[in-house]
Amino acid sequence: MKERARVVVIGGGVGGCSLAYHLSKLGWNDVVLLEKGELTSGSTWHAAGLCTQFNASLHLSRLLMRSIDLYRGLEAETGQPVGLHEVGSIRLASTPDRMDEYRRARSRAKVLGLPLEVIGPQEIVELCPIVNADGILGGAWMPTDGHIDPSSVTNALAAGARARGVEISRHTRVTGLRPRPDGGWDVGTDAGPIECEIVVNAAGMWAPRIAALAGATLPIVPLEHEFVVTGPIPDVAKLEREIPVIRDPEASFYVRAEGDGLIVGPFERETKAWAVDGVPWGFDSRLLEPDLERIEEILLRAADRFPAFADAGIGRIVNGPDGYTPDGRCLMGWVPGVRNLFVLAGFSIFGIVFAGGAGGYAAEWIVDGQPSDDMWEVDVRRFGPWAATPPFLVERALDVYAHEYAIHYPGEERPAGRPLKTDSLHERLQARGAVFGFRFGWERPLWFAPEGVEPADELTFRRPNWLEHVAAECRAVRERVGVLDQTSFAGYEVSGPGAATFLDRLCANALPGEDGRIVVTQMLTERGGIECDLTLTRLAPERFYVVSAAATQTHDLDWIRRHQPPGDDVVVEDVTDATGVLTIAGPRSRELLAALSNADLSNASFPWMSARRLRLGDVPVLAMRISYVGELGWELHHPIEHLRSLYDRLLEAGEPLELVDFGYRALDSLRMEKAYRLWGADISPDHTPFEAGLDRFVRLDKGEFIGRQALIRQREEGIRERLACLVVEADDAIPHGSEAISTPDGRIVGYVSACERGHVVGATIALSYLPVDLTAPGTVLDVDVLGQRCAARVVEAPLYDPGNERLRS
């Protein structure tokens, strides 16, 4: 084994081998892969090898397509067989809502150029003659899906990596990780030490134990997954072609051919977590004890759907553990708080089909600084330390497993593991009818049910039960005044003699020129993509207050700290947990504050985009005059211990002003009426501020900042697409994101990034990146909504108060 390498990859499963393969393809061949056993001896070796490209996320569907495309050509490239059976797959539907789910998937597939058809029962039987189609309304047919041999494809990836110079050291266990002063690592192993620049934790179920060696935590827990393998079945053996992989979501199982027999894999409601405190190092190429009783009910359902299975003998039962995260998606990216430690792990049972594409994107991330597609949905920084606490992690992971085949509706909020983080208003808001959502561990009010209305979401792809109540909240904010608990906001203080110089290099906008002034700014990648979107307030010449979204707390803080210069000239402090935030918005906001303060709140004294310290009653607040709803309003940042007291004072003072509570769903509607951008939906590292229509927040003439050169090049060359605002003629069902947008002649030109009903302007509003020549107001397009082509028209944005007169009032 080498004594030094550029990259050390820990883990020889399909994920680690895929990453090593892709690093070498990008020219990084000074790579050593360490595997404590044999290749594939973790979760990879007992996987069922299913390869599907069906996913509710457009970006992750693209990742899965990349995997299948790689596997198609891998055998020819490496000379190693991979056992790919591209037999297609069918997802059955026996409820109308399931058919709606597949219609949404078909629209998403059009964007990707992915073959997906919604077919009827007769076509299903023609494709799979051994299925009993009783009760089936239809299905989603994906002809390029299938299954692959897990060990073969892993060894093919390893062969490809070796051919380009990667060293693979088997039977070599990592025993220690020690950071070096130069930012690299000393990796201790039972075969001797190795020095490297970058460590990649691709250790699968063992990833949390490897992370712990570096002082980090990862939210991964192994869960048991069983499937059964039959002996030969005459009805299967006599078929002229192999059956597609069949999934029956309502019965919660999958079926695929295995020679002349079948593999049947249930997703039962009551699986078990295993080795919560850490998987033993020696658990290689081993299985857990079968528990046939646990899956018996689902096997009986499978026998009803496949009569040939009812009479088949079970040849063996495979019960193997797979690492799950709290949301079922893998962990990828730079581990926050640790230099040069990357993670690629936590694939659950989908490691085989995810690994090809994930290894490619991970290699791009390491080599080029960012992946070629938005990977936020699998970014390790979407979680904080709270996600790795065993009670929460286990409960959420078990829920993900149990609902693997459940319909995932727009706006769905799973209850498992909640509440986790609540502020002091939680019970009070609940008593006032709040229906809560979950974001970065926090409970946040989504909407408020009036008296006599059950405070609960009724999930649907069509008109939801909360729509009229959110509409009432929106009108109240536009006409009077509303209050929203935004304590989940992330907040950081950046201070010190070098703070201004440091932030100026990170931000595309110019810093506030005076104490008490606020700017909206983006932080960019070297390619000019939007990495962070936040507000920045200058509290003093050497002290700044940075506010970002709850969901990006770890992400944004990590981005800032990764660029923090050494020494004590810049201090970055996370003040999120010490700060409460109440937002008030609406034309009566000034009256509300005036009832609690003697301060001069006039425009002349307290203009838009400024901040002042006030006392509201006896509560000290940093009042920031900024509004994400497009109305006169303030964010009231204050010591969190005063949150309940401040809320009560606002309620009392607001009673004669008809103050209302409003939630995040109203906030989403109101921000869309103003065409305000939301990171993770409309803006991301995939697009620059120029493409997103955020030119006003970029100051190219202020001096050098990260991404500036890329923006200069783009301005010289011109942009090819721009974020446009559309009004969609949809009522019963509105788009929720990723729906295909086409010209009237059927040419796909984009997809919906975000969409909400604009209750005050009376329109369904969508945002989408479109070719520049299609962004002129008046351009007529179509949006595919549940299989229906709905007319859409590009409009001048924003639809509400385009002159910002309300904000500045």
Image: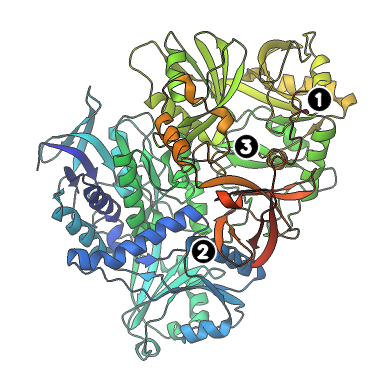
Quickly name the residue at label 2: 109
In this view, 745 is above or below 479:
below
- Residue, x 27% and y 66% (percent of image)? 73
Query: Who is closer to the viewer here, 112 or 10?
Result: 112
Quickly name the residue at label 3: 443
Amino acid at dot 1? Leu
Corner quadrant of residue 428? top right
Q: Tag 3 or tag 1, which sits nearer the N-term?
A: 3
Neighbourhood count class around disc 1 (C-alpha, 10 Å): few under 14, some 14–19, many 20 upward = some
Closer to viewer: mark 2 or mark 3: 2
Amino acid at dot 2? Ala
In the image: residue 624, left or right of residue 216: right
- Position of residue 280 measured from the top left corner of the image (x, y, whole percent): 27, 47
In the image: residue 280, left or right of residue 613: left
CA distance for labels 1 and 2: 48 Å
- Position of residue 183 measured from the top left corner of the image (x, y, whole percent): 25, 26
User: Which circle marks residue 761 in the picture?
Assistant: none
- In the orientation shown, which residue stands out farthest toward the front? 716
